[in-house]
Amino acid sequence: MKILTLAFLFRGDQILLPMKKVGFGAGKWNGYGGNIEEGEEPIDCIIRETEEESGLVIERNACKELGYMDFYFNDKEEWNQRVFIYRIDEFNGEPVETKEMRPQWFDIKDIPYHEMWKGDDIWIPNVLSNKNFTGEVYLDENGTKVISSNIII
């Protein structure tokens, strides 16, 4: 199982979601994050990945780890992943578009779940509420349908 990170950045009643332009998840809105490098802690990964993907600078104490989600893809074990989830309410700079991501601010009441990974609408409300949680989502082999899910708050 891959170990990844994912951060959601907030400004008041808005959430910053980038559109993934290349690679795994291309064409979907998501948070910032990615693969944890050898010897790297999840919090250090989220700081590094967010800066690389958005140009935003984040201080370590601004990163609140809310928990993790396990994602399982039917018949695609190589896609299975544990994702450590962070909420960030303080950062420096303005987000910029990179070769990998195109950022956009959304009102939290207008999150485009229909253009995100299936199942995100099940667990992201905990990020919006700033709640600690863990969970798992089982998806079909292409990630187009939720087979089952379980969230523990």
Image (cartoon, rainbow, N blue to C red):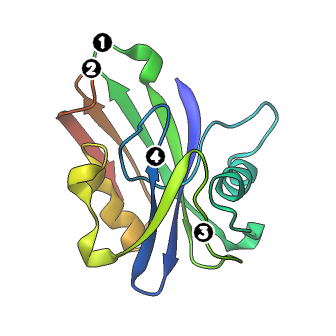
Q: Dot 4: few (<14), some (14–19), or many (≥20) neighbours within 10 Å?
A: many
Residue carrying label 2:
141
Q: Which three-letter amino acid code belongs to the residue tagged 1?
A: Asp
Which comes before the other along the chain, label 1 or label 2? 1
> Residue 42, percent across and down?
68, 47
Q: Dot 1: few (<14), some (14–19), or many (≥20) neighbours within 10 Å?
A: few
Q: Which three-letter amino acid code belongs to the residue tagged 3?
A: Pro
> Residue 148, percent across and down?
19, 35
Q: Which three-letter amino acid code belongs to the residue tagged 2?
A: Glu
Please indicate, yes or no, whether residue 27 appears anywhere in the rendered image.
yes
Residue carrying label 3:
95
> Residue 88, percent across and down?
58, 70
Instruction: Say what secondary structure mark 3 lies in.
Output: loop
Q: CA distance from mark 3 to mark 2?
A: 33 Å
- On screen, residue 90 versus residue 61, left or right, reads left
- On screen, residue 46 versus residue 72, left or right, reads right
Which comes before the other along the chain, label 4 or label 3? 4
